[in-house]
Amino acid sequence: MLRVFWCILSRDLTLAMRRRTDVLTTLFFFVIVVSLFPLGVGTESKALQIIGPGVVWVAALLASMLALERLYAADYEDGTLEQMLLTAQPLSLLVLAKIAAHWLLTGLPLVLIAPLVGMQYQLADSAIGIMMLALLVGTPILSLIGSIGAALTLGLRGGGILLSLLILPLYIPVLVYGAGAVEVSQIDLADTQPYFALLGAFLLIALVFAPVASSAALRISLE
Amino acid sequence: MALNWFKFASPATFYPIAGRLIPVFWILTLLLLAIGLYWGFFETASQLGGSNPQKEYYRIIFIHVPSAWMSMWLYIVMVAWAAIGLIFNTRLSFMMANAVAPTGAIFTFLALWTGAFWGRPSWGTYWDWDPRLTSELVLFFMYIGYMALHSAIDDTRRADRASALLAIVGLIMVPVIFWSINCPDPNQCAALHQRSNLTRIDGNILFSMLTMTLAFWMYSFATTFMRLRGIILTREAENTWVQDLLNARGRT
Amino acid sequence: MSEFFSQGGFAFFVWGAYGMVALLLVAEILQLRAEWRTIWSRLGRLTRMRDSGGTE
């Protein structure tokens, strides 16, 4: 069981490493969106500290959503996905491996670049630490929920824009608590604990249900 | 009672039944609307007391609350039919879910619109990021997403099943979203919308509110069945019973 | 009568809300009727096509 998981994971990572631009495009999209806001709303440090957490999270939502299209598209086009459906292995496990690879390629870079973005918004060091931690717990949830939408819109014309319509409303809880944790950390660090408890609970629930729902969606899309 | 419920699940059987029911629902709608509106405008006080007195504009309650209730109820109905379709693989259930969605979206929009027109005189603002308002907006997005996904997929079977799965995922997420908006700070919770308590409402107002709700409900039945008949005809166009229907209609 | 229409000075809000409800519900009915006619005329065209070109 675990071997299958590692097999798919390393395969997806290897494939992505052959085409590094895809990973970098998502990352730079995130950085550019975040850099545009101060130009629009003004560069006063007080204002930036207030909008910073929300802007970073919305940008993370958009970046991870844009990358979702690629989650199954390549495997769908060359027929690998159909082969995966036919294997004796549980499909949700394969899906989970694909989501994990997707997160390592699109979610983790966002977490690592967060300090840079935090400095743009004049956030305190502790707030930056909290933001990294919140992104670390929150972005996997985005990939997990998003994979359901990616599976449903597989191979559709204009699938990308449709995907945003379906998935963005479902991202609201992560946005609320992810941005909330960073905001609260600017007042009192101890208050952030319930936020992380909730984000962690969401992550666990999503880990259990999202692969099952995604594999059901894949079966619907491919039958 | 060995009634075979699956017999009614056949579009060919249900098509004439729906056709006979539609006029009944229209008559009920008009009747209930007339009673509810008359009672709401002429048999209720023009001003409500309390710490925050509500003047004539509170009459929006007779359409606001029923629209909000119907928007949520129709989403549940839609998901129920979608789930039944996925479990029992009945074509009619998917068509039913499809027929409910536009009416539900309209009521969701109306709940938001009438809420804005009530909020302006009583709260002083058309819109507030209050939990219920925001959740209703999210519900509207869910309806739009369901219809958009369904119309984006050309293959009917896949469209039915994919949007059904989406509706079910949406139903699971709506409480989580509502809760997260209701309680953005887990250390404390607050909301602008007053808690509803039906027992505290004046009898006359409650009567017209419930009558209007029933009217909207009957309206939903009528429009849903009208849309359902259209969907049945379009999808079954190649079947012989539709051809017979067409011939009979052509002769008269 | 005009007293009724002014709704105690809140005419804009009361009738704005009721007006939108009436507008959308009537629009939905009209749209359904138009759709119904389109479906029937298309079905009729389909059968006529089948009857005339039935030799294929």
Image (cartoon, coloured by chain):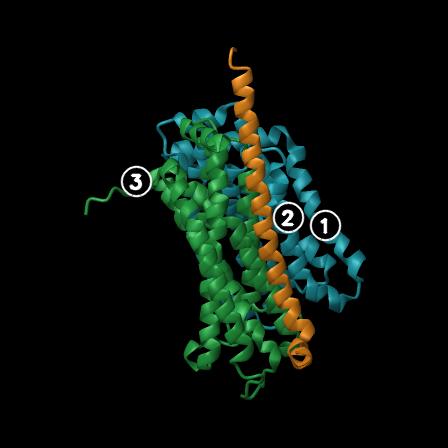
Chain colours: A cyan, B green, C orange
Amino acid beneath label 3? Phe
| B105 and A197: which is toward the camera | B105
Q: Chain of mark 3?
A: B
Q: Is residue B190 left or right of residue B28?
A: right
Q: Is residue B151 left or right of residue B74?
A: right
Residue type (three-letter) at the residue carrying disc 1: Val
Task: Name the one closer to the observer, B89 or A186.
Answer: B89
Picture quarter containing residue B91?
Answer: top left
The reply to whether the C-beta atoms of the residues labelled 1 and 2 are less than 8 Å apart is yes
- Residue B195 screen position, x and y as percent: 48, 76
Q: Which residue is mark 1?
A: A33
Dot 2 amino acid type: Leu
Disc 2 crowd rating (10 Å Cα; few below 14, some 14-19, many 20+) is some
Residue at disc 2, secondary structure:
helix
Disc 2 and disc 3 on one polypeptide chain = no
Front in this rendered view, residue B186 or B121: B121
Q: Which residue is mark 2?
A: A62
Res. B6 mark: 3
